[in-house]
Image (cartoon, rainbow, N blue to C red):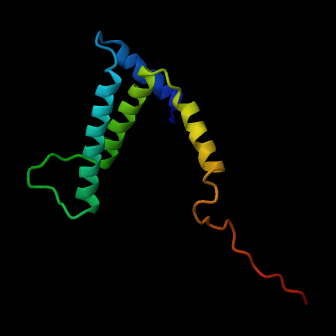
């Protein structure tokens, strides 16, 4: 079952709300996010780069690291009362207007020459 961003934000808020500590400060969350991005970089380097894992090194995955980044992003947004669906819509509007001609588009269907007989 797919979840909307709003549902994910509510789910994370219910989880965090059960603890007296609540959300971390914005600076702490930024530090945590940076840490998680570093862990993602490490996994990408192990999978696609020149640095294989050492023997006995913990198994992890790009999927789990992306999940950690998503979780901290949801926490960060919740703590600042940011609606991520609205943020996403605004960013997509920016890409669809300002950046619409920035990259080479893939043709939907190749154009064929019309032949008249």
Image quarter (top left, top right, bottom left or bottom right) of the C terminus: bottom right
Q: Residue at x 25, y 62 (%)?
A: 49
Residue 91: image x %, image y %?
57, 41
Q: Residue furthest top?
A: 20
84 relative to 26 in the view: left or right: right
Q: Is residue 103 above or below residue 13?
A: below
Left or right side of 109 for 49 = left
Q: Is residue 52 left or right of residue 85?
A: left
Q: From this viewpoint, is residue 108 visible?
A: yes
User: Count the marks: how many?
Assistant: 0
Res 44 quadrant in image: bottom left
| Quadrant of the rendered image containing residue 105 | bottom right
Which residue ends up furthest to the left in the rendered image? Answer: 55
In the image, residue 95 sits, relative to residue 33, either above or below, namely below
Quadrant housing residue 18: top left
Which residue is depicted at the point 69% across and 69% down? 109
Find residue 63 and report its horizontal and vertical position in percent: 34, 46
In this orientation, which residue lies closer to the viewer: 95 or 22?
95
- Looking at the image, residue 26 lies above or below residue 103: above
**Camera sees residue 4:** no
Q: Where residue 88 appears, x then y in whole percent?
A: 55, 37
Q: Residue furthest bottom?
A: 117
Q: Residue at horizontal 84%, vertical 86%?
A: 115
Height in image: 89 above or below 100? above
Q: Nearer the viewer, residue 23 or 47?
A: 23
Q: Closer to the camera, 54 or 35?
A: 35
- Position of residue 1 measured from the top left corner of the image (x, y, whole percent): 50, 35
33 on left or right of 99: left
């Amino acid at each position: 079952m797919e979840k909307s961003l709003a549902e994910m934000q509510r789910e994370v808020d219910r989880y965090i709300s059960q603890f007296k500590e609540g959300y971390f400060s914005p600076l702490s969350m930024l530090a945590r996010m940076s840490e998680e991005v570093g862990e993602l970089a490490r996994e990408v380097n192990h999978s696609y780069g020149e640095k294989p894992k050492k023997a006995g090194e913990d198994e992890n995955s790009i999927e789990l690291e992306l999940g950690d980044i998503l979780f901290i992003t949801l926490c960060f947004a919740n703590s600042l009362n940011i609606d991520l669906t609205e943020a996403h819509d605004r960013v997509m509007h920016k890409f669809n207007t300002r950046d619409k001609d920035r990259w080479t588009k893939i043709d939907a269907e190749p154009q064929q020459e019309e032949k008249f007989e």
